[in-house]
Amino acid sequence: MQIVNVKEAGIINVEKMLRKPAFDEVELNPKIREANKKLFGRDMTAAEIVEMIVNEVRADGDRAVIKYTKLIDHTEFTAADFLVTDDEYEAAYQGADKSIIASLRQAAANVRQYHQEQKPNSWMTYRGQGSILGQSVIPLDRVGIYVPGGTAAYPSSVIMNAVPASVAGVNEIIMMVPPKDGKINPYVLIAAKEAGVSKIFKIGGAQAIAAMAFGTETIPRVDKITGPGNIFVTLAKKAVYGHCDIDMLAGPSEILIVADKTADPVYTAADMLSQAEHDTLASSIVITDSRELAEQVAREAETQLQRLPRQEIARASLEKNGLIIVAEDIMQAMELANISAPEHMEILTEQPFQLLPYVRHAGAVFLGAYSPEPLGDYFAGPNHVLPTGGTARYYSVLNVETFMKRTSLISYTQPELSRVSEDVIRLAEAEGLQAHANAIRIRSY
């Protein structure tokens, strides 16, 4: 893991290090690319694979979904096998650890309580002289949530996607999860049931996204797709945007920690590794004004690495995307943090709330030594589906309004329309739209 001093490297070079590549620039792992070459008979980029799958699912529906589920996930399903049954839910509850179920329920309750506070209200106001204006806030009819699966299980992602949709009042929530050996992790099923998911389909990858976007004989078409996934899922969401809405384009997980000399290097290293173990592409960055802390964190990260079951992944992540930056002062550290616009920003300083006003771009901010990022991942209540890859500059955290839309309300009386008609006619004619002007004129007398 590299330690970089801003004074020595130069501010421009450090800023370049903090900028992330666009999604289309992400290169596939050579092993994955070779595996795909065997699957599809030729060397293809991720974008080319996704385009092929999306187009085929759009044209052939269930048949294409079955084809790619067999080809990619090595699972032979018929369309009748897609949907999770009541027996599968029952088996999940029967075989699960009751203490984990209790923790999932408490996490869901925390998330629900937090998101209830976000719920916007419809409103209508009488403006005087015969006009009423307002706004109607309406939940989406049907949404689809994608939850990563296969080699890992993420019940927390189920809660974070489904609970806000439920709070928003979405009528139907369907969920896609890639199966492992034809089955779904029991805690994912339990989390879905507790969070209010209507139906679960055992389908993953680009074919799942395309199926939700266009609908098939078995899978209903949705209005919006949310939830993170791998590069194929992300590119598929990008490809179907416009046919339905999406939440965001989610990339590898990332954390950026702003720390001063009072920060505990043990905590700081542990928090770096909490992201590094996700994926070899995950990013873990510390920016500090203390050279001594930088060196302590680097040593401590190496020590803690030795004890991790996912050591190989975490080490590869730190070697490729781990970075410790020594800034000239803490305010420069904050400036650099905003340039990075991280998914997770931790502030481990003596007075973290004093730096909060200077945070401009971050998906979520964790303040103080006892607010580590995993607290937000699982339990605190705010959502963990966050903008990545620097997109916190313009994307928001997943929230209740993600699953709602706003409709404007306008009502004028005839006298009030007549009073303003000349202004409206004048503006319409200035744009050369005579029919617009006429629609006002014939009502004004």
Image: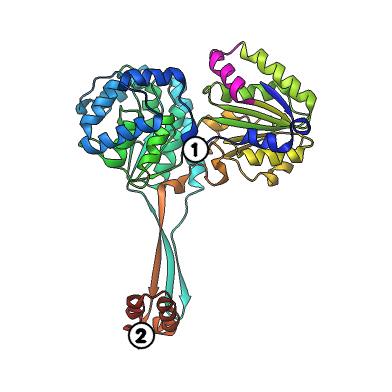
Along the polypeptide, which appears first: circle 1 or circle 2?
Answer: 1
Report the disc number at residue 298. Answer: none
What colour scheme does the image use?
rainbow
In magenta segment, residue 301: no
State which region is magenta: 307-322
Extreme residue toward the bottom, this view = 445
Q: Which residue is mark 2?
A: 444
Front in this rendered view, residue 415 or 314? 314
Extreme residue toward the top, this view = 306
Q: Position of residue 409 (x, y in %)?
A: 39, 66
On the question of residue 50 being in view, the answer is yes
Is label 1 in contact with label 2 (beta carbons under 8 Å)? Answer: no
Query: Would you place residue 104 above or below residue 112 in this image?
Result: above
Query: Would you place residue 2 above or below residue 198 in this image?
Result: above
Question: Mark 2 belongs to which amino acid?
Answer: Ser
Residue drawn at (31%, 41%), measured in percent from left and top?
213
On the question of residue 198 being in view, the answer is no
Left or right: 157 as drawn, with respect to 265: left
Q: Which residue is mark 1?
A: 111
Element carrying mark 2: loop
Q: Position of residue 368 (x, y in %)?
A: 69, 33
Question: Mark 1 belongs to which amino acid?
Answer: Val
Report which quarter residue 389 is drawn in.
top right
Quadrant for the N terminus, please: top right
Left or right: 281 as drawn, with respect to 189: right
In magenta segment, residue 319: yes
Q: Position of residue 250 (x, y in %)?
A: 48, 36
Quadrant for the C terminus, please: bottom left
* Inter-mark Cα distance, 1 to 2: 52 Å
Closest to the camera, between mark 1 and mark 2, is 2
